[in-house]
Image: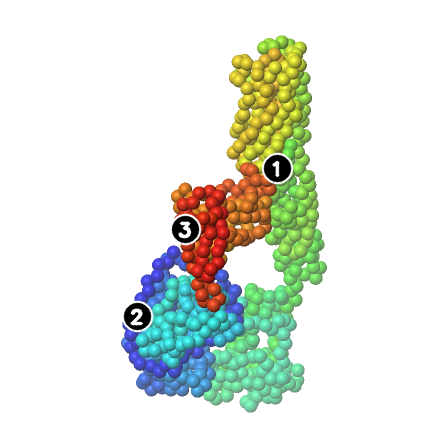
Amino acid sequence: MRKYIFILLFAPFFSFSQTQECATVPTQSQIDYLTQTRSARENWDGPEMIISLPVQHHIVRETNGTGGLDPNDIPIIMGIMNTYYANANISFFDCGTINYIDNSSYYNFNQSQESSVCGANDVTDVINIYYFNSVSSGSSSLCGYAYFPGGSWKNRIIMNNSCALNGSTLTHELGHYLSLYHTHQGSTGSNPELVNGTNCTTAGDQLCDTPADPTLSTSTVNSSCQYTGTSTDPNGQTYVPDPTNIMSYSRKSCRTFLSAGQYNRANYSAINDRGYLNCNTVVYGCTDPNAINYNPLATVDDGSCSYCITTLPYSEDFNNGIGSWTNTGSAGNWILNSAGTPSNNTGPTSGNSGSGNYMYIESSSPNYPSVGPFTLTSECFDLSNSTNPSLSFYYNMYGAAIGTLNVYANSSLIWSLSGNQGQGWNLVQIPLTSVGNTLIIEFEGTTGSSWTSDIAIDDINIIGIQQVNGCTDPNAINYNPNATVDDGSCIYPIVVSVTGNNLSCNGANDGSCSVAVSGGQTPYTYLWNTGQTTSSINNLSAGTYTVTVTDDSGQTQTTSYTITEPSAITIIYSVTNVSFAGGNDGAINITPSGGVTPYLYYWNTNPTQTTQSINNLIAGTYTVWVVDANGCIGTVLITINENISTTCGAITGVNLTDVIHDRATFNWDNMNSSICDVDQIRFRYREVGTNAWSTKTMGSPTGIGCNTLNTSKLILGLSPSTTYEYEFKIWYCNASTVNWHASGTFTTLSSCPNVTNFTSTPITNTKVKFDWNLNGTYSFLRIKLREDSTGSPWMNAGGFGVNYPAITKNKNGLLPGQTYRAQARTWCDPNGGAYRSTSWTPLVFWTQPTNVRLLNTNEISLLKVVDILGREVNPDKVINSTTLFYIYSDGSVERRIVFE
């Protein structure tokens, strides 16, 4: 959690005009962006680390370098910025030296000039702060403005020099740059912030620790920084704004404070909105690696990138001009000509076709001796889709002093010829090998020793076999029979297979499926009939699982795998009962099936036996666990009885009555008979799903006496809305014990809900009104009350009870001036009884008024209380069933009977 240190900064350095206001207005796209991220800003808890933001200062001066902000003020400005925003863990630092813009046209700045002056001077990815002698928009003078995050994402703050050092305005504009709204944002719109703060997260500045602001001004804030306005919000509540908040329109000398919420929002913006800011050295150039003039050192693209766009075949006869060729030589230009050259005995007499144009080098003075190079350069050709390119052209090198003609491909010499070649045009063809995917041709000429060395060229052609990229494999689904070069794009049919692991045990969920995919085009996506989207799925139960695999080209393949489970382990058994009372000749033989053989056996005997059959057993219940080869377990409980001639059986007639939320009564038949004497009865119960039993026993300890006649038992302390299971056991004096049996379940009722917010309100000096809130359904509510003195008797309000769903009840007959206490409790059984709320409501206390004021403002006072004989008595000291008369000042008499 960040800690905030709130600081009141020093007074402003300079005076300034209060009429100059902030011109920062968020665009709709900026508002939309801030709205989309509003929740993240509200819940932001930024890190403790310091975020450093780079700043570039631009001071605008007159053309002669005079005027402008004193550069010695820049450290002061940076100090103000860092002092305030240290509370947001933000630090500002200078990114380079001050940039001076010496142009009188911008010295007194109008907003319409922004793109021309700032666009040419902005440093990328830093906060650019411009300082002008004055700032205006149209005819309005401004202190400054900035840009919110979102929209055009400008890193720019415009400042009027007179406001830059007032300790308030630049901090205010930085707040906008870091997503802080005005505290009065939207105050005159359709959704003004309310004084009670109920819409503080969506209206105003969307911060709840800044009060609603009706738009402050010098007319509503006095020189003591106190708000003097009377504006009210739509609810009619008077605004109580904070004139010290920097993001308000209060007097600039008063604005010295930012709230914790504002600092937190600024921290979020510095990290999440402005995290791209950095102070890298700027190098301008072409940043596109695909351009022919790509500069790997460039950090800012200056728009100079050029590209090879001309493809083969290419032909140029110069009959329509020089075409796309350019003169790039240092000695002079190749000249476009159509007839003979000006000099005799050198150069052609016409173009190669007998007419038309050609290009030549004029060797007349001063272009000899040995003057060059004369260079004619082509445009850039794209050879990426051509193979075996070649260059052909015609040359004329006629003259006694002919120099040299060189041809370059991508700056590499590929052909050269010197000396007189006689009159006429000659064809040359040059294969262009190892030139790469781009091509630039240069014709370079150098004159000879005299003026008879004109050199000419014509009919340039560059051809190549057209290259068609594509898939050349007939086995691929995207095979292109026209492709000449395989570009690695072949896509093969998708092949999907699924493997899996079956369940180890019947009813388990440890199965799994995994997909193997080949062919197609990666990446693959998976969709199982379970809704899962991974290549493998686990924790599966038995069943068929289907997966559809889709590759990146849109191919789909669906396949399935069925997970099986072994059959459940079942156990068949035969029992040999004990043949006499107390005997040990019982035996059990089991026959398991299902699962996966072989089996292991574990009996709950002491010691544990591990055979399929066990012998020499006494009467009782035995448990056997059969474990198969996969570790799956089957179990069964087997009972051995004593074969005794007397037939005294299990308990019958078991039923439960009076089951409510915390108790139930067990009932059963009387198991005593002429041949069966009950020694002891026991039943146990527990919550379903738990292990520990609670036990109730009826009768003497076994073997002491045969006198157990119980046929019911009440149990208490049960939990509401809970299902219990139970079972019985019975001992007979003259027969064998019947082990646990007569099992069953029952469910307790839910708790009886009590009322809430039980209150008392005197209506007259003798009547009180009770109110409460419902908290659920019940049958009736009882209210008890008494005078608030030790030993005073309780009485009821509402008789036996107030039926649901009433929520109020009056009580008459109370004593004026007497203090009472009362509380309430609900019953869910209409007959009363134990099915009631767990406790009474908390006590409420009140005092009855002594007087009642009538509409004509006359008061009625209690004069005295007398008994039936007219004797004045103290009503607090009378005995039960005494009749009293209350005599009032208006002559009225009230008769009451006291019940203790």
Identity, as a three-letter code, of the amino acid under mark 3: Glu
Q: Which mark sits nearer the N-terminus, 1 or 2? A: 2
Q: Residues within 10 Å of mark 2 (few under 14, many from 20)?
A: some
Residue 334 place in picture, x, y as percent: 53, 83
Compare residues 717 and 245 and report the one nearer the observer.
717
Q: Which mark sits nearer the N-terminus, 3 or 1? A: 1
Disc 1 target residue: 509
Identity, as a three-letter code, of the amino acid under mark 1: Asn
Q: Against 249, is 672 above or below?
A: above
Residue 421 place in picture, x, y as percent: 57, 79
Q: Is residue 719 visible?
A: yes
Identity, as a three-letter code, of the amino acid under mark 2: Leu
Q: Is residue 764 left or right of residue 222?
A: right
Counting every numbered tag in the picture gives 3
Residue 330 place in picture, x, y as percent: 46, 81
The mark closer to the camera, 1 or 2, is 2
